[in-house]
Amino acid sequence: MFTRSQLEIKTLNELRDLCRKYGIKPTGNPGYKISYITCLMTFPELAIKQIREARELKRPSWNKFEAIGECLDEMGWKL
């Protein structure tokens, strides 16, 4: 997903926003960039492991699925 060098050049706020986007909590002190970098570096591997263990990602509700469809319609995307 990201290389370490790509994450190290980001600001603390950018790293915090990325973690919020993916629903990841930082390890250790949230005042340090390394807390966010560590989580973001391991996130893809953990997600793949959970899928292999059949723990899968949570499916969106019908309302959220409809909202995604409406957004795609407004953007002009055809499924």
Image (cartoon, rainbow, N blue to C red):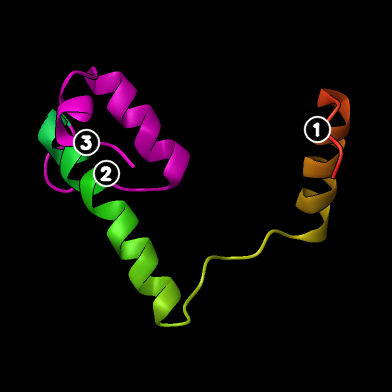
Q: Is residue 62 shown above or below 53? A: above
- Dividing the picture into quadrants, the one containing residue 44 is bottom left
Q: Callout 3: helix, strand or loop?
A: loop
Relative side of 40 to 68, left or right? left
Mark 2 lies on residue: 40
First along the sequence among labels 1 and 2: 2
Residue farthest toward the bottom in the current orientation of the protein: 53
Q: Is residue 26 shown above or below 17? A: below
First along the sequence among labels 3 and 2: 3
Tell me what residue is drawn at x 11 percent, y 35 percent: 34
Relative side of 66 to 10, left or right? right
Mark 3 lies on residue: 3
In the rendered structure, are the residues bearing label 1 and label 2 in contact, judged by CB atoms less than 8 Å apart?
A: no
Residue nearer the viewer, 25 or 79: 79
Q: Quadrant of the N terminus?
A: top left
Of labels 3 and 2, the one closer to you: 3
Tell me what residue is drawn at x 40 percent, y 82 percent: 53
Q: Is residue 26 visible?
A: no
Relative side of 47 to 36, left or right? right
The circle on residue 42 is none
Residue 75 screen position, x and y as percent: 81, 24
Crowding around mark 2 (Cα neighbors within 10 Å: few <14, some 14 to 19, many 20+) is many
Amino acid on which disc 2 is placed: Leu
Amino acid on which disc 3 is placed: Thr
Q: Which residues are magenta?
A: 1-30
Mark 1 lies on residue: 71
Residue farthest toward the front in the current orientation of the protein: 78
Tell me what residue is drawn at x 28 percent, y 37 percent: 2
